Amino acid sequence: MALLEIRDLVVRYGEIEALRGISLQVEQGKVVTLLGANGAGKSTTLRAISGLEKPASGDILFDGKSIAGQGPEAIVRLGIAHVPEGRRVFPGLTVKENIMLGASNRRVSSREISREADAMFDLFPDIRTFANTLGWTLSGGQLQMVAVARGLMAKPRLLLLDEPSLGLAPVIVQAVFRIISQIRQTTTVLLVEQNARMGLSVADFGYVLETGRIVLGGKPDELWGNEAIRAAYLGGHAKATA
């Protein structure tokens, strides 16, 4: 059974249909990437899963149980953490304080949370020296690492990552994706990414979204070898699979 299953999901913003009946699965222990151009519906998919958007119809199953329409707090408690686009690190808190906030859904002592936050610096050594630095002083790449570390502090079974490479220099993108490769050892990941090459480099399976519909799905080598995926990124129109 899939850890996450989306069935015929429709999400609307007023009269605009952002998702038009999409269906997908994320297996336990896998990395699945959602690819597509701006406006394809990738971020909306993550927001619906994490409870930030209410579906108009369809269903979202987590570990076999429907979570569609539940609020973000309840969904976090179930074991789903969402690292949104834009990082959203609190500028007036230190790096360590920002990371510790990720454990706010868990009933553990502040001492234990502090210990776990310190351990995050083993996974993210590039920000270790900034532990006591205020968030507003960090670079984009450092902010992204803080945001991912904060998401992992929730001890999620499923981590939703939205555009982790956005606005980052290539060398920093490489570092962030190395971390994603390490995360997959303990956490299932659903990754939204415009950078097709990087998204597929860490994925076990990928889906291509175009104007609110899934038009392609397959293993990374199948997708990368298909001309339709290039058409999607060049503004063309991929033909939907049966």
Image (cartoon, rainbow, N blue to C red):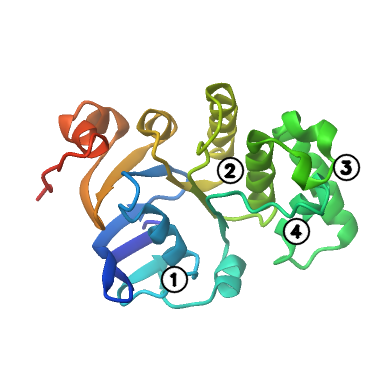
Few, some or many C-alpha atoms within 10 Å of disc 1 (few <14, some 14-19, many ≥20)? many
Q: Is residue 48 left or right of residue 142?
A: left
Q: CA distance from mark 3 to mark 1?
A: 34 Å
**Which residue position holds label 1?**
53
Residue 100, x across and y down, in percent:
78, 54
Mark 1 vs mark 4: give the one in front: 1
Q: CA distance from mark 1 to mark 4?
A: 22 Å
In depth, the one of 110 and 41 nearer the eye is 41
| Picture disc at residue 186 | 2
| Picture disc at residue 101 | 4
Q: Residue at x 18, y 30 (%)?
A: 226
Residue 240, x across and y down, in percent:
12, 48
Q: CA distance from mark 3 to mark 2?
A: 27 Å
Q: Is residue 226 left or right of residue 54?
A: left
| Picture disc at residue 215 | none
Rendered position, 119 above or below 49: above
**Which residue position holds label 3?**
132
Rendered position, 195 above or below 31: above
Q: CA distance from mark 1 to mark 2?
A: 27 Å
Disc 1 marks a residue whose amino acid type is Glu
Q: Earlier in the sequence, mark 3 or mark 4?
A: 4
